[in-house]
Image (spheres, rainbow, N blue to C red):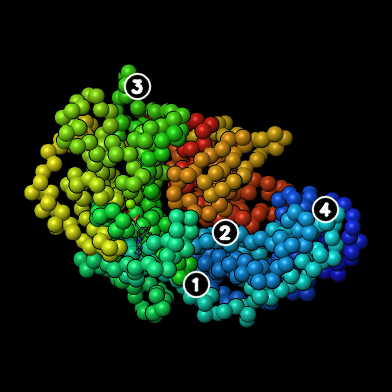
């Protein structure tokens, strides 16, 4: 289809005004505006259906964003994320949302929350900026409202572009600081390994959130302060703006590799610290309070998740022979218990490549974490299949280089296995490793270590590709994210409530497509999960998130995909109840 002009768009809209909604279909195609190009990629079949999809491409000759803000990959991701937020703000300020029935008048851009993610909503190159939006084409009942559509596509769109996508109208200092802040965070994350650290929490960071359902900072939060003995500083590539102050470096608590225990009284901020560390695998926006809370990228939160499915996982490092001689070397269940689910979550995280586990007593199965001296005396070892985590955690570190951070206020037996002990007291951290050693020496637990056999190499698995079927009704591929934690693949629902580091529904959507791609293109029933994930990450790095879109033949990819980590892709795969695996021996 050749390029039409903006005037032709108006003429079409005037002509189809008052006709049935299907007449909008004629809009599909591209239009040359004086300063940009509009493409209408998908036209919704009625005003109540999922909205229509459009793209605007603005040449850099017009937009004029300086290349230094997007030349490097991490800067590009940051600037794209920033621009999506600017477009969303412009929409909120300008767009008149109610122009008729159903979704008439709606404008949507998929901009992020507190985390900065690679997304498809905005793409920026040295030649142009492209923005992908969803719109509700206006109707009265099911009748085309041509004039309203004209107001949207010509005037509102123009206002949105003018306000948010031109460098000379951008708050340039804010924009630069956003990009530099994200780059600084990535720099810190890369530096952690060189310093033998797994995480960093800046002095002055605000960890608590406004509520259990809001990721905004708690306005009355007490700022974090690092214990002198764990204090480290970094000098990132850009100036550091933190808490309204400018400096060249940033100082805070470095959590060392190995086994770290976070202890302290109830309500003193232990879980809040761990939750900040969980999300520290992503960069945060300036002003979030956690923008300088940085965790190694391979950190995986582990929790109990009873009821989940487990497929061919070798649980034997943690769970020995079950009642009536049931082996756990290739364990399957449709209804895991608390302890078996937590064991599977660990084995699967390691299989996907994680070498940093985060656990909280609040969401762990007690019998998975500990069996104390009295229970050891009461229930003989042959009657207890579980090797508790306390008896594996040092082995994981010493033999496999797997670090662990455990929040544990209720069980002092863990003092024996910790390299570092951090106490939270009135939301402030203290390092009390020496005192903890003294207490452990003075009060022996009397428990016997219980690792019947040394930890062996993990048994890895291969995906049987036919076990993922994305078909639903007449559609060969039906994949839908219903919520951050609920994915539909074909007719199967994948429950992700226990996958706590999934932060954005657009990641969930991308995971849905990623699983389909793995099954349809990469899996052959022999390739190990880790290798499948490597191949997928390689593809995303070279071709971008768009490579996940399974309907490339029928138009441009949507603007509502965000990049998931390999650990969350693996987590979804492991929770898809139809999935079948084969152990690689
Ligand atoms: P714990 O796990 O030690 O029992 P939590 O981390 O759940 O405690 O925190 C208890 C409460 O204190 C939560 O409501 C949390 O939002 C709040 N809180 C945590 N850290 C801070 C802080 N730095 N400033 C103010 N409130 C905080
Ligand atoms: Mg807690």
Please tell me which residue is depicted at 44% across the width and 38% down the height of the picture.
Answer: 528
Q: Name the secondary structure under disc 1.
A: helix
Percent x, y of residue 553: 71, 47
Distance in Å between CA atoms under marks 1 and 2: 16 Å
Q: Earlier in the sequence, mark 3 or mark 1?
A: 1
Q: Which quadrant does the N terminus fall into?
A: bottom right
Instruction: Say which of marks 3 and 2 sits in front.
Output: 3
Is 22 in front, or is 531?
22
Vertical order, 457 against 85 (above or below): above
Please tell me which residue is depicted at 62% across the width and 66% down the height of the picture.
Answer: 88
Location of mark 2 (residue): 119
Any part of residue 207 in sight: yes
Is 523 in front, or is 442?
442
Distance in Å between CA atoms under marks 1 and 4: 43 Å
Please tell me which residue is depicted at 26% across the width and 34% down the height of the picture.
Answer: 387
Q: Are marks 3 and 2 in contact (CB under 8 Å)?
A: no
Percent x, y of residue 451: 21, 34
Q: Which mark is residue 141?
A: 4
Instruction: Say which of marks 3 and 4 sits in front.
Output: 4
Report whether the residue tagged 2 is closer than 8 Å to ligand 1.
no
Q: Which mark is residue 178?
A: 1
Q: Which mark is residue 326?
A: 3
Distance in Å between CA atoms under marks 3 and 1: 55 Å
Distance in Å between CA atoms under marks 3 and 4: 62 Å
């Amino acid at each position: 289809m050749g390029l039409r002009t903006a005037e032709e768009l108006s003429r079409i809209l005037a002509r189809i005004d008052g006709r049935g909604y299907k007449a909008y279909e004629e809009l599909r195609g591209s239009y040359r505006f004086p300063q940009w190009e509009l493409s209408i990629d998908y036209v919704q079949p009625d005003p109540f259906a999922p909205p229509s999809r459009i793209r605007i491409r603005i040449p850099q000759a017009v937009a004029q964003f300086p290349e230094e803000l997007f030349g490097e990959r991490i800067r590009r991701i940051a600037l794209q994320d920033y621009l999506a937020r600017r477009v969303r703000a412009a929409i909120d300020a300008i767009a008149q949302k109610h122009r008729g029935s159903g979704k008439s008048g709606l404008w949507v851009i998929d901009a992020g929350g507190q985390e900065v993610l690679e997304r498809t909503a905005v793409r920026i190159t040295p030649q142009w900026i492209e923005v992908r939006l969803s719109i509700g084409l206006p109707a009265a009942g099911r009748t085309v409202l041509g004039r309203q559509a004209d107001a949207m596509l010509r005037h509102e769109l123009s206002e949105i572009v003018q306000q948010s996508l031109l460098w000379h109208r951008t708050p340039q200092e804010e924009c630069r600081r956003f990009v530099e802040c994200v780059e600084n965070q990535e720099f810190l994350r890369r530096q952690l390994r060189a310093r033998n650290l797994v995480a960093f929490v800046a002095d002055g960071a605000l960890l608590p959130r406004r509520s259990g359902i809001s990721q905004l900072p708690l306005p009355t939060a007490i700022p974090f302060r690092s214990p002198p003995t764990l204090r480290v500083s970094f000098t990132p590539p850009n100036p550091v703006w933190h808490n309204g102050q400018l400096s060249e470096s940033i100082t805070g608590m470095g959590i060392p590799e190995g086994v770290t225990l976070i202890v302290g009284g109830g309500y003193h901020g232990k879980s809040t610290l761990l939750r900040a560390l969980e999300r520290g695998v992503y960069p945060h926006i300036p002003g979030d309070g956690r923008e300088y809370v940085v965790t190694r990228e391979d950190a995986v939160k582990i929790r109990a998740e009873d009821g989940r499915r487990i497929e061919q996982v070798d649980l034997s490092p943690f769970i020995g022979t079950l009642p009536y001689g049931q082996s756990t070397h290739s364990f399957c269940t449709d209804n895991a218990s608390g302890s078996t689910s937590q064991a599977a979550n660990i084995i699967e995280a390691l299989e996907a490549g994680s070498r940093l586990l985060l656990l909280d007593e609040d969401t762990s199965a007690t019998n998975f974490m500990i069996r104390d001296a009295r229970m050891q005396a009461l229930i003989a070892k042959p009657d207890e299949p579980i090797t508790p985590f306390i008896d594996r955690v040092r082995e994981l570190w010493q033999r496999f280089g797997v670090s662990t951070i455990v929040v544990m206020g209720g069980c002092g037996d863990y003092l024996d296995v910790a390299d570092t002990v951090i106490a939270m007291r009135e939301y402030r951290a203290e390092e009390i490793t020496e005192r903890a050693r003294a207490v452990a020496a003075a009060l022996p637990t009397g428990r016997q270590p219980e690792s019947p056999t040394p930890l062996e190499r993990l048994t890895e698995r291969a995906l049987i590709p036919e076990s993922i079927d994305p078909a639903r009704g007449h559609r060969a591929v039906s994949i839908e994210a219903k919520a951050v934690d609920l994915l539909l693949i074909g007719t199967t629902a994948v429950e992700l409530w226990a996958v706590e580091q999934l932060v954005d529904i657009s990641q969930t959507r991308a995971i849905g497509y990623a699983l389909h791609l793995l099954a349809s293109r990469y899996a052959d029933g022999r390739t190990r999960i880790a290798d499948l994930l490597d191949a997928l990450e390689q593809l995303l790095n070279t071709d971008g998130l768009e490579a996940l879109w399974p309907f490339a033949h029928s138009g441009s990819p949507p603007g509502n995909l965000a990049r998931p980590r390999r650990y969350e892709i693996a987590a979804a795969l492991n929770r898809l109840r139809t999935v079948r695996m084969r152990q690689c021996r």
